[in-house]
Image: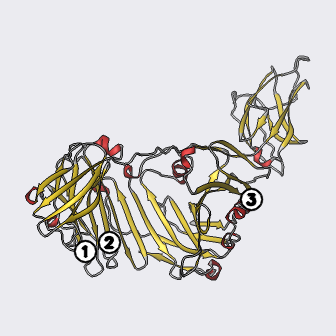
Amino acid sequence: MRVKIPLFAFLFISFFSCNKTEDPINPKPIDEDDKNPELTISGFTDIIETTIVVSIGIVDDSTVETKVVHNGEEIATSAEKQFNVSINPYTIPVGSTDFIVTAKDAMGNEISETHTVEIKHLLMTYEYDASEKFTGQTNWVFFNSHEKTELAALELEAGVHKIYTDEVILENSVYFSAVRNTFIEGDDSYKNLFVQTYEIPLGDTRSSKIYYESAPWENTVDVQLNGVPFVNGRSQYVATGPNYATRGFDGDNSSTILNISYETAEPIYIRTNSQGSTPFDGKKENYFYTKILPMEGNNTMVVESDAFVNAENNKKIDIPVHDAGTFRVIRYGSISEQDFMDSKLHTIYNVSEASDNPRDYVDLPIISDMDSYSSDISYSRNGVSFSIHAVEDLSLNTEMPDWTVGGKVNDTIFELTANNPEVDLYTIFYNNQDITPDYSRSHRLRWNYIVSVDSSGLKKIPRLPLPEALVIEMNAPIYESTNEMEWSSTLAVNYDKYKTHNEYLEYSVFNRNIAPNNKFTRTQMSFRNPDYSSKSAKEYSDEFSKMHW
């Protein structure tokens, strides 16, 4: 088999032989044959807008040489009688073009087919549901090449959008940006633009998200806790769950009243409040809870103080050395595995550390009638923030990983260096704002770049401009240029569910392979810019030091 790739190579050619024992074409005496080879071609379509595979088959008694020609250039040559050619339209100018397939046997008999197609460049099929657009908000998407060329920009409306570009694209990916513009109708003093950018493959489909309006919980109950003093306007207990929440507190020196709204008559867990009249230290001897079952139509309940008990079991978590006042933990529980899968989670434990009272350990409660748990733990040390979301206690490792992050940043590019094999993605955070002291003007621009790093440990991320149409809509100086945006921090994230960056894109961009946050363990570290002070990013063009713990 011979494969010829022209200098302007725009096709990746793969051949799959059906007969690996055929001899190459050799001059030899054969019986006279004036019958043309039989040629079968499948895969060509009238319009080629994403990469396709064309299958070519030849039937002939002798050896055959087949050529595929485009614009006068041989793009493939094969002596096989069955092979495939992959055609990438993005490197071909848009419009009508011909592909000619010619098969010639050893006797010089020849057959040729011409396939005329229209070339288009599909960037993405974007499904957008009406429920994704909220009051006081517009949503845009835009695309850029690796050289920062604007390929397309679109303000989204409900429907299915096939987004194209006329530009030739030589890479296998582009930068895709999703935009949320939040504003107050008729008030130009408040503008808030949030942009999130990903590097994505070409021609994929983004499925819509459907949001359902939830009706407000119509039921309320005032729960009087006898023997629980209401001190300094703070309640010692609180209740938060999948379909209930504490809306207010009241009381006196002898009792506390919790005003709880709820959806249906299901169990409500009342537990120690981390911000109660007595600060909660997270220790098992100071944690109490009780369970009540409200009855629709009954607006009052009474609970005696001795109904509150300690958790039946606990898991001790040692807290690594950290900056005082930065430790936080919140723990969720579900009554059944199905409730856990349906995200019906009760908040059963919450600790916020005071700067003058650092923790060295906490006891996570294990309640007898709960089946599954997830916990969020976070703290900071020397300017680096760590957090973990763990589905099961066995995966709850609170030690800060030995990850390193470094790079260079200026007003055109961010050069990220990070050789951490277990990290799935990095997010580069930029910010800019124009806010007057009296808040008569509040214009903000936040931009996150979400990227992966290959085995080289190096990734160059261009700083993109906003599309012209969006700049016109925003109509404020802060949005006219992104050069003044300041790098604020870099986030490194490892998911146990997603093993590659492409798997993460399936979830985060294309809305496939979705798992709610409580279904998997996530570990992350945030490295902040120590010089972050609302200055221009171009003032930080020198390499910043690698940070690791």
Q: Give the mark, 3 or 1, whose residue is nearer the N terminus.
A: 3
- Is residue 279 shown left or right of residue 397? left
Q: Amino acid at mark 1?
A: Arg
Task: Kindly identify the amino acid type of the residue bearing the numbered disc 3.
Answer: Glu
Can residue 7 be seen here?
Answer: yes
Q: Is residue 310 visible?
A: no
Name the mark on residue 359: 1
On screen, residue 253 versus residue 415, left or right, reads left
The residue lying at 26 percent from left, 69 percent from top is 275
Residue 327: mark in rendering? 2
> Could you tell me the amino acid type at mark 2?
Phe
Q: What distance separates the C-alpha of mark 1 from that of mark 2? A: 8 Å
Residue lying at the far left of the rendered structure: 306
Q: Which type of secondary structure does the marked residue at label 3 adopt?
A: strand
11 vs 461, nearest the viewer: 461
Circle number at residue 150: 3
In space, the residues marked 3 and 2 are separated at their CA atoms by: 43 Å
- Residue at image coords 33%, 46%: 218
Q: Is residue 544 above or below residue 269?
A: below
Label 1 close to label 2 by CB (< 8 Å) = yes
In the displayed structure image, the side of residue 320 where residue 459 appears, left or right:
right
SS at circle 1: loop
Residue 543 occupies which quadrant of the picture? bottom right
Q: 115 above or below 435? A: above
Residue 408: x %, y % from top left: 61, 76
Number of marks in the image? Answer: 3
**Residue 71 horizontal/vertical position (percent):** 89, 42
Quadrant, the C terminus: bottom left
Residue neighbourhood size for the residue with mark 3, other residues' Cα within 10 Å, grouped as few (<14), some (14–19), many (≥20): some
